[in-house]
Amino acid sequence: MLPNPDEKLDPRVKRTRGLILRSFEDLLAEKNFETISVQDVTDTAQINRATFYAHFQDKYALLDYSISQMFKQEIEKRTLNACHYTPDNLRNLILAVCEFLGRIHTSCAQPHQQFESLVETQIKQQIFGLLSHWLEQSKSKVPSEIPATVATWAIYGLASLYSHTKKRPALEKFVDEALPLVAVNLEQFA
């Protein structure tokens, strides 16, 4: 299972971060990221700015943390963090990324390029970490960095295509068509 650095946090810190995150997510549903200020978040969360800055450096750090936590929950919900590489687990990962990006694009008001770039960075880091973990478990003699990188970019690219498509095909069909394109990069190393 992948480590979770938030597990050891004081319950008060967890509660305050949860309050900040919920407020931020509510604001993202109403406004685009660029127009949200730290003051908006603190007003919505009913906390002072010093409390916010005790947890996050700025709204960009909050976005990183928010996306990280939401995507981590998506992965944990599917128990992919406790698995090893199989074509079925890879399929579930692609499905999770497509669903997650689809939700981000429908639940956030007018996501812009800067917002999407920050989301992309965070999600790719987590996909890469998970794929590297899976490949390391397989005890392959080949380093996992290159196949994990190629698969990460393929998965994110396909999920991005899916989430930006106006008339989306059925998700299951899309994932079934995408799976062989990603699996070919990993199967020889797993």
Image (cartoon, helix red, strand yellow):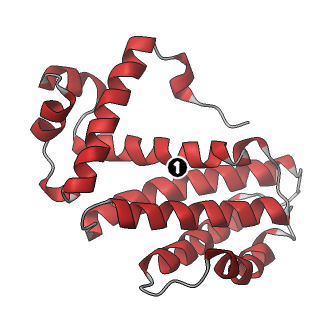
Q: Above or below — where is 125 with respect to 49?
A: below
Mark 1 nearby-residue class (10 Å; few <14, some 14–19, many ≥20): many
Residue drawn at 40 percent across, 58 percent down: 119
Q: Quadrant of the N terminus?
A: top right
**Viewed as shown, does residue 34 lie left or right of 89?**
left
Place of residue 125 in the rendered image (x, y in percent of width and height, measured from the top left): 53, 53
Q: Which residue is at the front of the view, 43 or 156?
A: 43
- Residue position for label 1: 71
Residue 60 at least partly seen? no
Residue 42 placement: quadrant: top left
**Viewed as shown, does residue 89 lie left or right of 107?**
right
**As shown in the figure, which amino acid type bears the numbered disc 1?**
Phe
Place of residue 157 in the rendered image (x, y in percent of width and height, measured from the top left): 53, 75
Place of residue 50 in the rendered image (x, y in percent of width and height, measured from the top left): 15, 21
Q: Which residue is at the front of the view, 145 or 113?
A: 113
Place of residue 82 in the rendered image (x, y in percent of width and height, measured from the top left): 76, 41
Residue drawn at 68 percent across, 66 percent down: 146
Q: What element carries label 1?
A: helix
Q: In which quarter of the image is the C terminus?
A: bottom right
Residue drawn at 56 percent across, 44 percent down: 72
**Viewed as shown, does residue 12 lie left or right of 138?**
left
Q: Which residue is at the front of the view, 131 or 158?
A: 158
